[in-house]
Amino acid sequence: MQASQRDFEKAQNDLKTLKKDPGNDAKLKLYALFKQATQGSCNTPKPGMLDFVNKAKWDAWNSLGSLSKDEARQSYVELVNNLISSEGPAKDSSQNTGQKYETLEVVSKDNMTKIFLNRPEKKNAITLQMYKEIGLALDEAAKDDSVITVLTGYGDYFCSGNDLNNFTNIPPEGKEKMASDAAVVLQAFVDKFIDFPKPLIAVINGPAVGISVTILGLFDIVYATDRATFHTPFSQLGQSPEGCSSYTFPRIMGLSKAVEVLLFNKLLTAHEACKLGLVTEVFPDSTFQKEVWERLKAYGELPKNSLAFSKQLIRETEKKNLHAVNVQECERLRERWLSEECMNAIISFFQNKAKL
Ligand code: COA
């Protein structure tokens, strides 16, 4: 349900009752959501580099892109509720599950657990910590009382894929260790999606890149705004497909279309992805959040066990293959991450960034 003006005002008052300082990140997010909810998209000039405080506030507001006032109000209310409940005693699953995640926000309400990717200033790029937190959030959602589980993103992107900084933090043992540790994290992450026992729904709120596209074959429903695009530039990066997409994409979209996407970096619009079967339905951006959450709320009222068992019947026969594919894809990536092709591509991403 969308937060009303009254909920919004109540949240502003509730915020004053917080016992602990919520920290700069949360305060910036609250500021940005408040501005977006009351004034719409950021429309003020960017402050100068040395005006640190105002620049940080401007960046936070600007990172919300075209998020509608209604969505911003809703997110503001959810964030305040999360901050408040994280100060209180242990919660049951009818409430928010709190702020134990640094890179996510997880909200359980209306028989639905929503997992928000929460690094909008980095286009929700997935750090190693975030891979682990998503895995933990899925473990919890699998066990909680919710009927369906939803993954979505804050800000203007759904997700820009693997955080390329994951490749720059080389441990003292060397890059081989970095690659094998990352492969272990990735394999465990994808396993969580393969094994997830309830209906899993992706709400694609903006462009999706890399692994945030490839795992979509493991979701049961994918709803997208018409502003979303889907891009897997693996060969540009000297890498190879993951998320079981080497197996699911040819089955979903046919071999030659999957080859264009996974080998030749073809970017799909939301409508193209829908035509190919990767996306279930596309919604106009202006009504996306309202229509999708209303529909999901109705799904959440269906009988929990019937949905879970039906999903398991549909997925069970493929599970063994999917796990085997996941092992192979991660092993190939471990090798790719150490390759000259990949290293050169990562270096050029950061060099281009430095030039801007
Ligand atoms: N890894 C690391 N940092 C990333 C990132 C990623 N995958 N995606 C975005 N970011 C960072 C940017 O470096 C930038 O950081 P800064 O503010 O410190 O400079 C910030 O997020 C915002 O992104 P920016 O590039 O300014 O936004 P944009 O709208 O111009 O472009 C993208 C967005 C996603 C097209 C661009 O950031 C990009 O190409 N990212 C890499 C995507 C990728 O190759 N992913 C891996 C796929 S396998």
Image: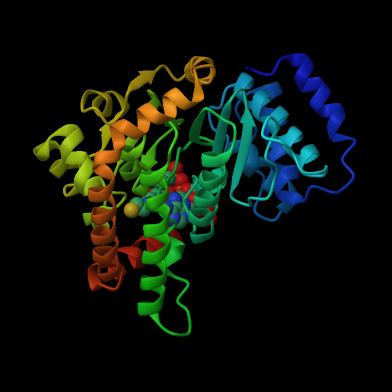
Which sits in the foreground, 8 or 190? 190
Which sits in the foreground, 89 or 261? 89
**How many numbered callouts?**
0
Name above or below for residue 112 compared with residue 330. Answer: above
Q: Position of residue 114 (x, y in %)?
A: 56, 33
Name above or below for residue 198 compared with residue 188. Answer: above
Residue found at the far left of this picture: 256
| Left or right, residue 328 beside residue 18 | left
Which sits in the foreground, 247 or 302? 302
Name above or below for residue 196 compared with residue 339. Answer: above
Quarter of the image for the N terminus: give it.
Answer: top right
Q: Position of residue 145 (x, y in %)?
A: 59, 32
Quarter of the image for the C terminus: give it.
Answer: bottom left
Which residue is rendered at x = 25% and y = 46% of the image?
Answer: 245
Which residue is rendered at x = 35% and y = 48% of the image?
Answer: 211
Q: Quadrant of residue 251?
A: top left
Which residue is rendered at x = 68% and y = 50% of the image?
Answer: 100
| Left or right, residue 355 beside residue 75 | left
Name above or below for residue 106 compared with residue 111. Answer: below
Q: Quadrant of residue 72?
A: top right
| Left or right, residue 289 beside residue 94 | left
